[in-house]
Amino acid sequence: MATNISRLTSLLLGTSLAATMASANGGELEKVMKARGLTENDVIHAAKTYTPSGGRDEFMIFSSGGQSGQIMVYGVPSMKILKYIGVFTPEPWQGYGYDEESKKVLREGNIRGREINWGDTHHPAISETNGVYDGKWLAINDKANPRIAILDLNDFETKQIVVNPVFKSDHGGAFFTPNSEYILEASQYAAPFDNNYHPIEEYKETYRGGITFWKFNDKIGRINQKKSFVLELPPYMQDLSDAGKGASNGWGFTNSFNSEMYTGGIEVGMPPFEAGCSRNDTDFLHVYNWKKLATLTKNKKNYKVINGIKVIPMSVAVANNALFLIPEPKSPHGVDVSPDGEYIVVCGKLDTHASVYKWSKIQKLIKDHKYAGKDPYGIPILSMKDSLHGQVELGLGPLHNQYGKHWKDGEIYTSLYVDSQIVKWDYKHLKVLDKVNVHYNVGHLCGMEGKSADPQGKYIISLNKLAIDRFDPVGPLHPQNHQLIDISGKKMDLLYDMAIPLGEPHQAVAIRMSKLHPEVRYKMGTNSRTGKISKGKTLAGQERVVRKGHNVTVYATLVRSHINPERVTVNKGDIVTFYLTNLERAEDETHGFTVDNYDVHASLEPGKTASVKFKADLEGVFPYYCTEFCSALHLEMMGYLMVKDPNKKYVSAQKLKMKTMSKAELKAEYDKTVAVNTATDAVIQSVVKFLKANHYEKYPTVKALVVDALDQYGKIPAQKKLSDKAVKAGDLEKAVLFENMIWQYMVKTADVGIRAKNLLVKKVATKQSAAAAAGERAFGEGGCGGCHVIGKVSSGPDLTGVLQRHENAEKWVRNFILNPKSKYHDPYVEGMINYFNLRMPNQHMTKEEVNNIVEYFKWVDENANLF
Amino acid sequence: MATNISRLTSLLLGTSLAATMASANGGELEKVMKARGLTENDVIHAAKTYTPSGGRDEFMIFSSGGQSGQIMVYGVPSMKILKYIGVFTPEPWQGYGYDEESKKVLREGNIRGREINWGDTHHPAISETNGVYDGKWLAINDKANPRIAILDLNDFETKQIVVNPVFKSDHGGAFFTPNSEYILEASQYAAPFDNNYHPIEEYKETYRGGITFWKFNDKIGRINQKKSFVLELPPYMQDLSDAGKGASNGWGFTNSFNSEMYTGGIEVGMPPFEAGCSRNDTDFLHVYNWKKLATLTKNKKNYKVINGIKVIPMSVAVANNALFLIPEPKSPHGVDVSPDGEYIVVCGKLDTHASVYKWSKIQKLIKDHKYAGKDPYGIPILSMKDSLHGQVELGLGPLHNQYGKHWKDGEIYTSLYVDSQIVKWDYKHLKVLDKVNVHYNVGHLCGMEGKSADPQGKYIISLNKLAIDRFDPVGPLHPQNHQLIDISGKKMDLLYDMAIPLGEPHQAVAIRMSKLHPEVRYKMGTNSRTGKISKGKTLAGQERVVRKGHNVTVYATLVRSHINPERVTVNKGDIVTFYLTNLERAEDETHGFTVDNYDVHASLEPGKTASVKFKADLEGVFPYYCTEFCSALHLEMMGYLMVKDPNKKYVSAQKLKMKTMSKAELKAEYDKTVAVNTATDAVIQSVVKFLKANHYEKYPTVKALVVDALDQYGKIPAQKKLSDKAVKAGDLEKAVLFENMIWQYMVKTADVGIRAKNLLVKKVATKQSAAAAAGERAFGEGGCGGCHVIGKVSSGPDLTGVLQRHENAEKWVRNFILNPKSKYHDPYVEGMINYFNLRMPNQHMTKEEVNNIVEYFKWVDENANLF
């Protein structure tokens, strides 16, 4: 019968989604669609991306932040941006570059003594185990100032920056080798390896490209610079790279776009660089054996040391069969190795084809020493034709590739810059399968683990470079546009436009959310940049100010809602260091710290110790405060740094006469404060009782809140002691203040405790029947909730137990709702009217709604203990 | 009959949305809901927020960026973040703080000679005309380093920063007066107005609070510091403020939270500041007449000058009836004046009530000199009871208020920090109407123009301070959570959780999108920070390098895809300035510029001139390049800065021997290049013909693209001249290069031209019938599109005109799709099979689908000229 109904419905409805909405949910969806001009497809797309409150994503994206110098993190399919992480540019929210610990990391990126305070981040990469992303470390390059940064995916912080000592720019990095042995970084604009001037006329002789192989220690997540090395290459302007895997493990591949070795010079009457560097039909794919190269570095005769790094000359690499060239269509962008390492797909930006090279063919040519020629630097050239599996015409401006879940069948996706399309094609059987338009010019595209050994399919993100008419205008500088495309069906389906509010992301990398397990707090006293316990770690009771000559070190703690100490006095000219430890254990209880006007800032997540340091060269009074809205008393979390000029004589101000309180007044205030605390404590105890009775410990999220609440509550006895001591000493003024502090702790306890209680109620209440649920909705939407709050007296009486309050109560309630007037003279109702000074109005409900509301009241009574 | 069907459907379906989905759209929505665990309500919420590609928002939100020091811009209801604007913190993507023009603005924010490179932005405000937002200027304060920044909403850039010369921190700003006469800025942590040390023991005597009234010039959007002044206040720790309007125009209101004047001192055994400053049940609302105060500054006897600014002593304000205090519930946050200026709503954070003061009552007390007493500084205190309209118990931790569309009926919304709720209530009739839970602790809330004289209702955004379990974890530092709430119905409805990826936004302000009309390009050569033409403006042909002693000035231009000049040689130690002009007129054709390793960066939107300046103190070769992916040849847009040591003798490198081309080879290449250009030009001409024939000029978005394409195309004749000149001079090498440049311009023309064509096709094609539309879908989803592309030969033949190609074509096509095998030996099909090396497969379509596809083909033929 159910099937029949469904068929009949189907028949009546046709296939139009919108038509069915008319009757559903009071037609609300149709109303919304009409009002907002949404089509049926829009609603499907909305449902495919919309992520309700508290919902989770399937993939996490790490996107380069482009010229912002940062990394952007977002979720798929929600396309919610979750974090910008400071990498090459100082970022004050995170204290990055504003506290001493992170400054140390940022300053590792100085070049030849110069502070660099930004970066042009390009290609993020996730560390790999057997070619599969392991979710442990993230690397990214800076094109403008050739550097690599390493981030820890345990806390999403930048831990290391290394400077390339011989390159003057980079582009084709970062790429991990399949077991994270090395990170590849290719140069971009050729330049001399030394730091000297060489005239442009000697470009071919003295300018060089190269690949740097950064030795990576996967255990500690740091690059070992001493074990790293460089392969010298001709000045062909090397571009993107990829490490081989599977069949091609041990090898690397790098594109180039100026094998013409043109150098431009508009100012001397020559055509611009762009004309000369795209003159030839082909450029060179560089093929090199990094495993072999690594062993070469063990013998001194195989390398030169330039600016402190080992550089293997081209001639040595050639002599050891470790370096080859293959022609590729001109000015290519992406070179992307298939998950099994057997195919290498190259897109020639100024060609309409993708070229699929086959590793077994290349390998054979190498093995057989079958060369088509040599380049001017003596590097063997392999025949393009003999290396190719084949070519496919994709469209105008093919750039980059990502593999799909069915890569074994040849599934691959490519971005077309000029055509503004993503094309799905088959790299094995060499045919185009589908195309989808994007808005507009796309650079990279990002598949879900789409360049790993285990592509996940499902989505492709198109990283578009122009947004023009896509979003509401925000001035001449537009956001970029990342478009989410569903690739799970036969046809690609464009789901969502995401505006990029900061920087121009160059490339992004996706990983399954299930592979990430970041921490929410640090071990107490951790210097997060080193992972070690900070020498400034300070526990409660250890706060102190230590002076050594002109160096003043403050060991401070932060906890809801005070900084200890609250006043620090130093001399003008002192070097002041604040070590700051956040004593909180509760998740998300971050505190911030700044001293006004001194240009320092720290973000202190639970357990972290960080420090700020400055010369107190300005006399005066400078507030310091917690910069994160951490609790109800956040605004009050402050202190004063006083900078005294030791060479100045200060005259005391004339004391203002203020009214003081009499002993009796003080006693009255003391008694009142204690009474308020006793009453507040009773409320807290009732919440605690409720939590215990309902086994809060069974629900981890509730338990975490209760632990935090009890932690706050546990601070009270110490304050009580101080209060009692003050009472004994006859200092009621001070006792009142300590009693107030007790009250503050109670507020903090209640703040978290109530949140825990509300969460627990939802977990333990009995399941609502459909009628009761409909009744709750009717109760809310019908206007009852305006005056009645379940479990509380509000503008009308509490309705918990209403079905126990009257004879024949269900009927009584029904009648009252349907015709309130009829009961205005019922003595009970009359009493209520007088008390609240309001009459129950007629909400014109249907009988069905009223019946449902009664069912809802029954459910309320079943769970009366929870409200 | 239609009604009957609808009723029947309704009957069969019940009211469940999910049930109806089973049959609709092939059940796709239900499938998605099931797969993603979405409820019916989720789908409604998705539809209320999802904004399809190219869609527009109704409101724009300017949110403070908190400790990031920036401003965040996003749309409502899409909740897409559109931009982070650099304000107090350098931001390299925008060149903010990395080019000379913006550095000048940023450095206006130096304090006592110290560079400040971050800010703690709190309260953004939009300029007003008659109390209504006019969408012209935006102001925001920095709490940590008391400053105000002004942004221009014409280009979303920061134009001015002013430093408060007497405050040591601020909080209660920025607030515009109703006609933007002044911007109010209240201090936060009391401190001496002078820059000297004063011991904390003299807090009451020498520490002061205050309000600064920044005189604003609404025409040019700048603060006039000379015409600004300060009102001295007691050290009560002034907090939020609001300017009166309507009835209370001319007055201002400021809260406070430490009327106890407690100063803490845990380190000396006293309870923390948080305990002492919330001891009393009430603090003070400050009420002052800014119009009166402004006139007082005209007479020297009424003010003192401290650190260069006029300061009106409290005594003078009191003597002139311009300053009063009213008790308010303790430690309040928001003070929010109703749209007509008659009510002032104050929320006492540590009280459960909102207090509604009535302006007419306050005014009468002032007029009648009816004071309840005086504070220790002699300021008259008005009776709280006599000033109040009434109080309402809202819940735990009420903070801030926003007015709804029906504010005349009393509609107001308040955030509850401890209860984690938004409460809707009636400030006129003093009753609670509705509450909604938020996740979690909310600080400010943002209504749509909810604090202006013309609140728009519709939405409330809850700015939540903790996110804990709301999003996928990103380490110990969590994003914040802005929650969008629909307030258009009776009950508030929580629609969307938005993660905040950067900074902790403190407050946000909303404005109707229709009020904003930002520019997309600058007048050629504009210094965007001053709005004036830059002295470095450089047009095509004016590029040059000017040397004066050690100062080298490069006047450079940027245009797709080269920087002119491409080589600049300077001496080590020279001071180098690059003036950069982006010659583009096309929207979104931004170029970026950096010199590697020199820590400079500029973002050059169309028409902008900006400059970077540095000392060339490092010898060597430094690439410079365009940092924005501006066109297909973006990567090639580069040049070299050569820094020579004038004291060094350089030895020339030995020339490498390279193969050169023979004259015949060169001639062949030249001919080939010219031929390619001729062919490419023919394609361009055909596109142009299509565009003209279809009246591109009627569609502004298409027209803008065509203008840009023709602009690129127009650059070709000059290159052709150079090529021809080279041919005449016998330099075929050079001629080839210029021909390549011509080709590059053609690529750029085609890039934009094709986008214009595709856009135009959509605008001019005939309307599809429902059957044709279904047919197009079936064509796409049934797999046809894998081989056939309309208008193009792909992996299968072009199907344009297929209904003309066969006898009885409709029937032929139908049969062929339903049973391809039957026609494999039809000579035409056989030819195709041989040509494409592929056979048409059976896609198992229904007869209806095939009929629809035929209808689609008819539509294609109708519009054949468009493909």
Image (tube, coloured by chain):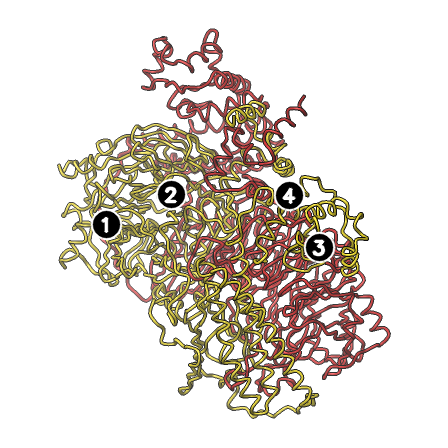
Chain colours: A yellow, B red
Q: Which residue is mark 3?
A: A787
> Foreground mark, 1 or 2?
2
Look at the numbered discs 1 and 4 and tell me whether their residues touch, using CB distance below 8 Å.
no
Task: Give x and y (percent) for residue A719.
Answer: 52, 80
Q: Residue furthest front?
A: A807
Task: Give x and y (percent) for residue B594.
Answer: 43, 55
Q: Nearer the viewer, residue A667 or B197?
A: A667
Callout 2: helix, strand or loop?
loop
Callout 1: helix, strand or loop?
loop
What chain is tagged by disc 4?
A
Seen in the picture, residue A231 relative to B270 is either above or below; the reply is above
Pointer 3 local density, CA inside 10 Å: few below 14, some 14–19, many at least 20: some
Could one spot residue A618 in this view of the protein?
no
| C-alpha span from label 1 to label 2 | 49 Å
Q: Which residue is mark 1?
A: B655
> Foreground mark, 1 or 4?
4
Q: Nearer the viewer, residue A439 or A657?
A: A657
